Amino acid sequence: MAFPIRILLSLLLLASAVGKARADFAEGKLPDGVYHCEVYLLGLFINLGDITIKGNVYSGPVTFGTSGTYNYQMDANGEISWLGPLGGYTSGGNSISLTQATLDDPGAPSFDIIMKQQDGAFTASTCTKH
């Protein structure tokens, strides 16, 4: 099951490497708002909480007990670096492998978070602006 995640990671990295820098990404931030995060697991969409973005600051997801606001950075290709904790994504031995913004639809910006679990497995989730 780790093999498909490696393919997904490779495709995301390839797309960010060969893709043209987008004007939206060049600003270095996501559109302000609340982003609802979900993962598809065992045939169900599981709610992972909401991440609130305002300027270059984020908070959440509160579902995992994260409180406070922290800065983030986004490069010209839409790769996001979280400069603080990110709820369950960065606790209990978990870490962020990659976060990639997708602004293909201006009305529905989103980002995908690839989390590496303590056991070495990868999990992908999508956060969409509401």
Image (cartoon, rainbow, N blue to C red):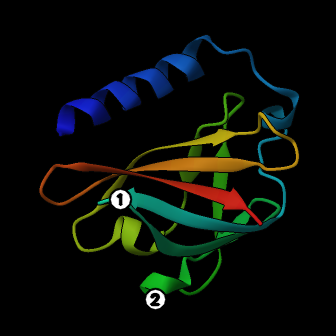
Instruction: Assign the C terminus to one quadrant of the image.
Output: bottom right
| Residue found at x 23% / y 58% | 117
Q: Is residue 126 above or below residue 101?
A: below
Q: Nearer the viewer, mark 2 or mark 1?
A: 1
Q: Nearer the viewer, residue 69 or 13?
A: 13
* N-terminal-most mark, 2 or 1: 1
Residue picked out by circle 2: 65
Q: Is residue 28 left or right of residue 85?
A: right
Residue picked out by circle 1: 43
Q: Is residue 85 above or below residue 12?
A: below
Q: Is residue 62 left or right of residue 29?
A: left
| Residue found at x 28% / y 63% | 94
Amino acid carrying mark 2 in the image: Gly
The location of residue 17, given as percent across then percent down, is 56, 16
Q: Residues within 10 Å of mark 1 (few under 14, many from 20)?
A: few
Instruction: Give the spatial CA distance, label 2 vs label 1.
Output: 26 Å
| Residue found at x 61% / y 74% | 50
Amino acid carrying mark 1 in the image: Gly
Name the residue at the left extreme. 119
